[in-house]
C-alpha cells in the first residue's frame, strides 16, 4: 500500500509539472514562429537562414544581435523555469510560406472576415525535460518534449468597394491549412490523409535548423 501511495503522490506533483512544461514548449514554438515570419517580412529574406535568429543570434548587426539575445533570454528563462534543459534545444524554422510552389494553398488569403493572412512560417522545437525531484521519480531519464507552430503575418483587409462585407460573406479562404493540428488535436504529420496544412508545409524547399 505504501509504494502505491508514494506513486500516487509523485504523480500528483509531477504530472502538473509536465503539463506546465509542455505548455511552455508550445508557447516557445509559437513565439519563435511569429518572430520568424515577422523577421522574414522585415528583411525580405523569404528563403534560407535568417541573420541573427535565436538561439545562436549571430549577426554582423550589433543591434539586431542584441535584440535577438534579449528575446532568446526571455524564452530560455521560461523554459528553464519549467525544468527544460535549454542546452538541449533543437529545432527548425521554414522558408516563407509565400515561396511554396503550391499556388492554390500558399498565402495571401482572407481569414476572420476583415483580416488578410500575408505570410506564415513553420517552426518546430524539441528539448529534454527533467522536472524536479518528484518528476524524476516517475521519469528518471527525463522526457524529450516537442512542439510545432505556424506563425501568421496578418493585416486588416480593406474592401475596395467601400462597403464592408460580413464575415459570412467573406468566408475563411485560408481554411485550416495553417493549423498544425486537426479538430481533435492530433498533429497533421501523424495523419495518413495528408491534409492541406501538411501538404503546404511539406512543399517548402528548405528548413533551417537551430540549436541551443
Image (cartoon, rainbow, N blue to C red):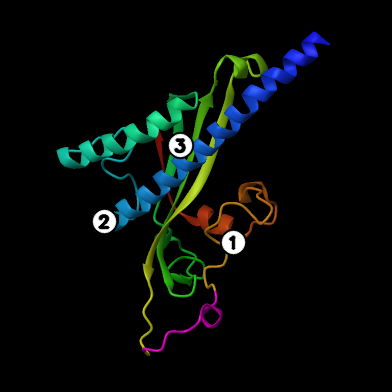
Relative side of 61 to 21, left or right? left
- Rendered position, 83 above or below 48: above
The residue indicated by pointer 2 is 42
Q: Please, what secondary structure does the residue beneath circle 2 have?
A: helix
The residue indicated by pointer 3 is 91
Q: Earlier in the sequence, mark 3 or mark 1?
A: 3
The part of the image, by quadrant, that contains residue 45 is: bottom left
- Rendered position, 44 above or below 48: below
Given residues 64 and 78, the one toward you in this image is: 78
> Which is the main secondary structure of the residues drawn in magenta?
loop
Residue 110: % across, % down: 46, 72
Q: Crowding near pointer 1: few (<14 within 10 Å), some, many (20+)?
A: some
- Rendered position, 70 above or below 34: above
Relative side of 54 to 91, left or right? left
Residue at left offset 26%, top offset 43%? 51
Q: Crowding near pointer 3: few (<14 within 10 Å), some, many (20+)?
A: many
Which disc number belongs to residue 196?
Answer: 1
Residue at left offset 65%, top offset 14%? 137
Tally of numbered tags: 3
* 164 is within the stretch colored magenta: yes
Q: Please, what secondary structure does the residue beneath circle 1 have?
A: helix
Q: CA distance from mark 3 to mark 1?
A: 22 Å
Figure quadrant of the N terminus: top right
Q: Quick check: can you spot residue 63?
A: yes
Q: Please, what secondary structure does the residue beneath circle 3 have?
A: strand
The part of the image, by quadrant, that contains residue 68 is: top left
Q: CA distance from mark 1 to mark 2?
A: 27 Å
Q: Earlier in the sequence, mark 2 or mark 3?
A: 2
Q: Please provide the residue range marked out in magenta.
A: 162-171
Mark 3–mark 1 contact, CB under 8 Å? no
Relative side of 69 to 156, left or right? left
Which disc number belongs to residue 52?
Answer: none
Amino acid at each position: 500500500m505504501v509504494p502505491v501511495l508514494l506513486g500516487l503522490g509523485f504523480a500528483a506533483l509531477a504530472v502538473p509539472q509536465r503539463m506546465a512544461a509542455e505548455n511552455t514548449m508550445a508557447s516557445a514554438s509559437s513565439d519563435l514562429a511569429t518572430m520568424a515570419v515577422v523577421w522574414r517580412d522585415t528583411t525580405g529574406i523569404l528563403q534560407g537562414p535568417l541573420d541573427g535568429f535565436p538561439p545562436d543570434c549571430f549577426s554582423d548587426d550589433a543591434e539586431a544581435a542584441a535584440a535577438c539575445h534579449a528575446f532568446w533570454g526571455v524564452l530560455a528563462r521560461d523554459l528553464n523555469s519549467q525544468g527544460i534543459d535549454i542546452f538541449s534545444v533543437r529545432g527548425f524554422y521554414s522558408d516563407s510560406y509565400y515561396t511554396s510552389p503550391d499556388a492554390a494553398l500558399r498565402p495571401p488569403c482572407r481569414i476572420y472576415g476583415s483580416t488578410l493572412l500575408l505570410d506564415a512560417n513553420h517552426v518546430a522545437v524539441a528539448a529534454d525535460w527533467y522536472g524536479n525531484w518528484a518528476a524524476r521519480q516517475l521519469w528518471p531519464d527525463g522526457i524529450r518534449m516537442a512542439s510545432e507552430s505556424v506563425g501568421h503575418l496578418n493585416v486588416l483587409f480593406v474592401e475596395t468597394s467601400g462597403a464592408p462585407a460580413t464575415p459570412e460573406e467573406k468566408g475563411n479562404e485560408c481554411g485550416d491549412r495553417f493549423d498544425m493540428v486537426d479538430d481533435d488535436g492530433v498533429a497533421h504529420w501523424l495523419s495518413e490523409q495528408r491534409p492541406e496544412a501538411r501538404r503546404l508545409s511539406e512543399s517548402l524547399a528548405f528548413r533551417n535548423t537551430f540549436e541551443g
